[in-house]
Image (cartoon, coloured by chain):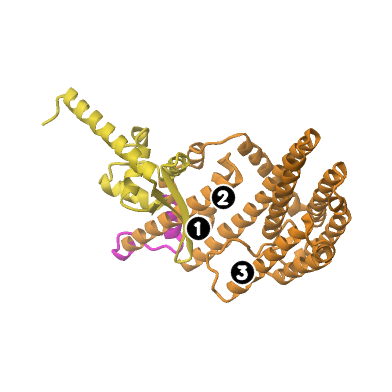
Chain colours: A orange, B yellow
Amino acid sequence: MTQPRPLDDLNAYLAALNAALAVGVKSRSRILEEAGEHLYEAARSEHADLVAQVERGERPAIGDALWTEAQARAIAAFGSPEKVASGFEKGLLDTLDKRVGLLDAGFETWLQRRPIVAGTVWAAVTSLAWVVLGAAIFAVGRLFEIGYAMNVLMPFVFAAAGYFCLRMVFVFRRSVVASWRGLPLFQLPGWRLVALRDWVGYLFFFGYIMLTDPMSFTGLMSLWMGLAIVVDVGVRLARRAGRAAGWSAYGEDPDENWAKYMTGLWTSAAITLSLIALQTSSLGLTAALGLLLVAVTGTVAFSRRLAWNSSVKRNWGHTYAARAAAS
Amino acid sequence: MKGEALKGHLEMLLLAALRSGPAHGYGIIHDLKSRSEGAFDLQEGTIYPALHRLERSGLVESQWSVENGRRRRVYMVTPKGGRALEEKTAAWQSFSHATTRALGTGA
C-alpha cells in the first residue's frame, strides 16, 4: 500500500476538517488558517524531536519518514476533524453555506472532467452577475422613476459581455497551466491579463459614466472601483518589490479579486438603496429592498465563498509546499 | 487528566493562560501543559472552539499578527475577561476548599 506523501498529510487533515465544519465561510476560513498554523508548528516541533532522536542514534533516519511521522503525531494530538468541528457553534446560514460548498465541490469535479464546457458555463454565470445587479438597480429606478438608476442596465450588459469575453480567454488558455474554474492560477501572464481586464473594463464602463454623470450612484461606485484597482496594482508592485509580506487584501487569483469587487459592488448597492428607502419610506420599496437584500446576501456569500476557496488553495497548496520543501 | 474531566473548566484555564500576556493557540496549549506539568491531556484542537466562544462573549479579543512572514491569530484577555477570571477563580477556590474538607484530606 502506498504511503501518502508527507505534504499531503496536513492538507488531508485540513480538507477533512473543512468537510466536517458546518460554519459560515468567514469562520471557516479563520478556523482552517488557525488549525493549519497550529498543526504546522506542532509538526515542526515533533520533527525536531525526531531528528534529535536520530542524532542520538535512538532511531534510524529514513528519508521523508520523519516528517510523515511528525505530521501524524501533530494530527493525533490535535484531535479528529469531526470532534474539533463539532465544538464550533453553527446556525442556519452556516448550514446553507455548507450546501453551497458541496455544490461548489461538485462543480469543481465537473470542471476537471469537462474543462471547456464547465469553464464556459462558469464564465457565463459570473458575467450574468453584472446583468442581475444592473437589472435590480434598473427595477428600483423604474419603480421610483430615478433617472440615473434606469440608465445603468445597458452599461452593465456591455460590462457583462466584455467580462465574459475576457474570461473566455482564460478558459482557452487553461491547457497550459493548472486551473480552477478555467482560470490559470499562480502562473501569470495571468496578472497582466487580469490588470488588463480591470483597466479595460474600468475605462469603457465606468470611465463613460464618470464623464457623463460623476455624482450618480454608479459614478461614485466607479470611483470606489478605481481606488480598488489602484490599491490592487499598488499591492502587486509592493509584492514584486518584496515589501508586502502578509498582505492578503488582493491576491494573484483573479477570482479572489473579482469576489472582492462584487462584494463591494453589492455593498454599495445595498447602502444606496437603503438611503433611497429612508427618503421615500414606501412599503413597496421596502418589500423590493427586502427581496434585493436576499439576493445580495446570497451573492455576497457566494462570492466570499470564491474568495475563501482561492485563499485556501493559495495558502494551503502553496504555503505548505514551500514549507515542506524548506524543512 | 483527560479532556472530559476538564469540561466546564477549560474556559477558565484559557483565561488564566492568557493572563500573563497575548498568545496564539499553540502557545496557550504549551503554557497549559507546562503549568499543569503535563497533567492536562486535552486534545489540542478543542481549545479553538472554546477560544471562539470566549471571544463571542467578549472575554477575549484576537487579531492576526505576522511573525516571520506567518500569520497567527493572537488572543488577549479583555477587562471583562479579567473580571470573569477573578470570579471563576474565587468560585473554584471556594469549591476546591469545600471539597477538600468534605473528603477529609485537608491539612
Disc 3 is placed on an element classified as: helix
Residue under pointer 2: A29
Q: How many marks?
A: 3
Q: Is residue B32 left or right of residue A12?
A: left
What label sits on residue A6 in the rendered view? 1
Question: Residues in magenta?
Answer: A54-73
- Quick one: label 2 or label 3, which is nearer the N terminus? 2
Q: Is residue B44 left or right of residue A233?
A: left
* Separation of residues labelled 2 and 3 (CA atoms): 22 Å
Query: What residue is rendered at 66% in x and 38% in y?
Result: A96
Tag 3, which chain? A
What label sits on residue A235 in the rendered view? 3
Query: What residue is rendered at 66% in x and 44% in y?
Result: A101
Q: Nearer the viewer, residue A223 or A20?
A: A223
What label sits on residue A64 in the rendered view? none
Q: Is residue A212 left or right of residue B36?
A: right
Tag 2, which chain? A
Q: Quadrant of residue A259?
A: bottom right
Disc 1 is placed on an element classified as: helix
Q: Is residue A212 left or right of residue B23?
A: right
Query: What residue is rendered at 31% in x and 65% in y?
Result: A55
Q: Quadrant of residue A294?
A: top right
Do discs 2 and 3 belong to a common subunit? yes
Badge 1 density bin: few <14, some 14–19, many ≥20, Cα 10 Å: some
Queried whether the magenta region covers residue A208, the answer comes back as no
Please state which of the two labelled residues, at mark 2 or mark 3, is closer to the viewer: 3
